[in-house]
């Protein structure tokens, strides 16, 4: 992970570094300018940035879009939040001799820090594209499939539950054979949401490829720079990069799960808003009413 001069780890700078090999030479020069002095890049006008990188002004803007941002203004805003003071990043690993009080502080600090870093680094245009694709599938009564294995399979189940409440034909599967069968039955207009912490699961790489070949829009939530993220660079895919300091080989991943759950919440909220509250509110109210009848009566 890269570190700026204040000792803050910058996920955004790591993402830019990982993207350099895939960028055109001119945009690579802009990327290197960012990595050389992120603070200055966030504050300088586009004319000076283009002069320093020896590129045209439109090239600077194209670079910002190539690495997943809406444009120069959006990129500089996120960059400033990533490297400037105000949100220090400290990943505090737990130790075997930590007391319960220490665990409370460290686990919560890790989660909060990761979420704040993602807030600053999130590419809003990728979120918007994912929401639009999901809304189109929902309105057309097409399939929305969530795929994950292991810990990510639990996130997929949570996503299915949230979309199910919106009246969407959504299912989740974590079994590799079921995922292959499900993806094979997808078609144009459907959405496949592939969730992976490591981005290295062969099952999920295969199912993403099958869904793409069948014409479905493939939305990938994974670490940038992973094999799954590289596969999501081709047309028909939407990559939502979810980077964090947690080792993907960790036995009990915590931060990654929370980050993925938050991304699912963002997508669900965006879809619900676009579908319109007038049509959803009566259904959700009826669901709550019917669920109340399943509860035990309050003690008298």
Image: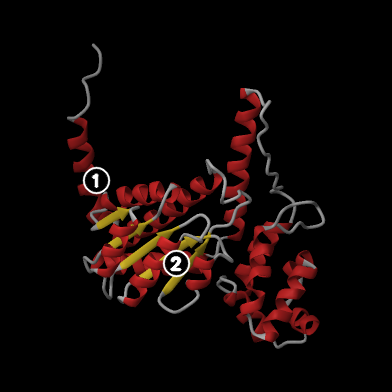
Q: Could you say whether the residue bearing mark 2 is in a helix, strand or loop?
A: helix
User: At x 69% / y 85%, what residue is drawn?
Assistant: 25
Give coordinates of residue 282: x percent, y percent: 20, 48
**Does any portion of residue 41 appear in the rendered image?**
yes
Give neighbour class at mark 1: few <14, some 14-19, many 20+ (Cα, 10 Å): some
Q: Give the quarter of the image for residue 45.
A: bottom right
Task: Report whether 200 appears left or right of 83.
Answer: left
Q: Which residue is mark 1?
A: 284
Q: Counting other residues with Cα less than 10 Å from the Cα at mark 2, is it few (<14), some (14-19), or many (20 or more)?
A: some
Which image quarter: residue 122? bottom right
Residue 140: percent from the left, percent from the top?
Answer: 23, 69
How far apart marks 1 and 2 lie (CA) works out to 24 Å
Image location of residue 186, percent across then percent down: 26, 69
* Image quadrant containing the N terminus: bottom right
Q: Identify the residue at horizontal 70%, vertical 80% (top origin).
A: 28
Task: Tell me the quadrant of the picture where the C terminus can be found.
Answer: top left
Residue under pointer 2: 128
Q: Residue furthest right?
A: 5
Image point (63%, 38%), residue name: 109
Q: Is residue 285 above or below residue 124?
A: above
Q: Residue at x 22, y 22 (%)?
A: 296
The total of numbered circles placed on residues is: 2
Give above or below for 7 relative to 126. Answer: above
The reply, left or right, for residue 110 in relation to residue 136 is right
From the viewer's side, name the closer residue of 12 and 253.
253
Q: Tell me, yes or no, if residue 46 can be seen here.
A: no
**Which is nearer the eye, 159 or 73?**
159
């Amino acid at each position: 992970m890269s570190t700026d001069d204040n000792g803050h780890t910058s996920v955004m700078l790591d993402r830019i570094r990982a993207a350099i090999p895939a960028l055109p030479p001119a945009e690579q020069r802009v990327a290197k300018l960012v990595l050389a002095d992120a603070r200055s890049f966030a504050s300088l006008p586009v004319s000076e940035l283009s002069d320093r990188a020896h590129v045209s002004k439109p090239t600077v803007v194209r670079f910002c879009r190539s690495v997943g941002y809406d444009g120069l203004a959006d990129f500089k805003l996120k960059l400033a939040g990533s490297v400037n003071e105000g949100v220090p990043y400290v990943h505090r690993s737990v130790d075997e001799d930590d007391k319960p009080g220490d665990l409370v502080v460290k686990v919560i600090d890790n989660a909060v820090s990761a979420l704040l870093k993602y807030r600053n680094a999130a590419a809003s245009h990728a979120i918007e594209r994912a929401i639009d694709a999901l809304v189109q599938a929902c309105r057309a009564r097409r399939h929305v499939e969530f795929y994950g294995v292991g810990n990510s399979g639990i996130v997929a189940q949570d996503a299915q539950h949230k979309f199910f409440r919106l009246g969407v034909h959504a299912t989740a599967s974590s079994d590799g054979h079921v995922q292959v069968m499900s993806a094979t039955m997808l078609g144009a207009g459907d959405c496949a949401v592939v969730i992976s912490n490591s981005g290295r699961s062969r099952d999920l790489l295969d199912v993403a490829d099958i869904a793409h070949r069948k014409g479905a829009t493939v939305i990938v939530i994974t670490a940038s720079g992973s094999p799954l993220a590289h596969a999501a660079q081709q047309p028909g895919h939407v990559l939502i990069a979810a980077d964090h300091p947690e080792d993907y080989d960790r036995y009990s991943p915590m931060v990654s799960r929370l980050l993925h759950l938050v991304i699912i919440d963002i997508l669900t909220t965006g879809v619900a808003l676009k579908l319109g509250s007038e049509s959803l509110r009566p259904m959700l109210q009826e669901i709550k009413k019917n669920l109340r009848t399943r509860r035990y009566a309050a003690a008298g």
